[in-house]
Amino acid sequence: MVNNKNASHISIFRLLIMLAVAVWTTSLAGELEVEFDEGYHYHRILPALPLQVDTGHVEVLELFWYGCPHCYDFEEYLTKWKREKADHVKFVPMPAVMNRNWVPQARAYFALREMGEAERMHS
């Protein structure tokens, strides 16, 4: 026969150990200093890429891929946000190109943009 009192103590002991480990690892994460070195962790783009907005305005750049299910699902919320955004916010869509298979869709977007049809076809 199993002693329930013993099983209860073991469960509480395990819970306390897990709690102590969680607190200890969380405190370690706060002490970590992450330093990023230019040239090693990142490269500065010079000259800086020009913004498509005037000073005092905000540019929101959307990277998208037509084959991305997340981009597709998010479009409904993004369309609503674009209608309600402040006047000083400029929304700039830009197709992402992660590999050469994505290039035709990016070219199609830029062609549509030049024809004035990107907004209609994009959403």
Image (cartoon, helix red, strand yellow):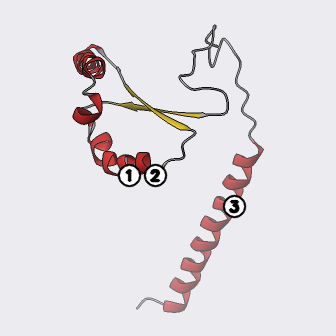
Kind of residue indicated by mark 3: Val
Vertical position of residue 23 compared to residue 96: above or below: below
Nearer the observer, 45 or 30: 45
The structure residue drawn at horizontal position 26% and vertical position 20%, both measured from the top left corner, is 102
Neighbour tally class for label 2: few under 14, some 14-19, many 20 plus, Cα within 10 Å? few
Q: Which residue is mark 2?
A: 84
In the figure, is residue 80 to the left or right of 109? right
Kind of residue indicated by mark 1: Lys
Q: Nearer the viewer, mark 3 or mark 2?
A: 2
Dot 3 falls on a residue whose secondary structure is: helix
In the figure, is residue 119 to the left or right of 61? left
Neighbour tally class for label 3: few under 14, some 14-19, many 20 plus, Cα within 10 Å? few
Q: Position of residue 69 (x, y in %)?
A: 26, 41
Q: Which residue is mark 1?
A: 80
Q: CA distance from mark 3 to mark 2?
A: 42 Å
Q: Quadrant of residue 13?
A: bottom right
Q: CA distance from mark 1 to mark 3?
A: 41 Å
Q: Which residue is mark 3?
A: 23
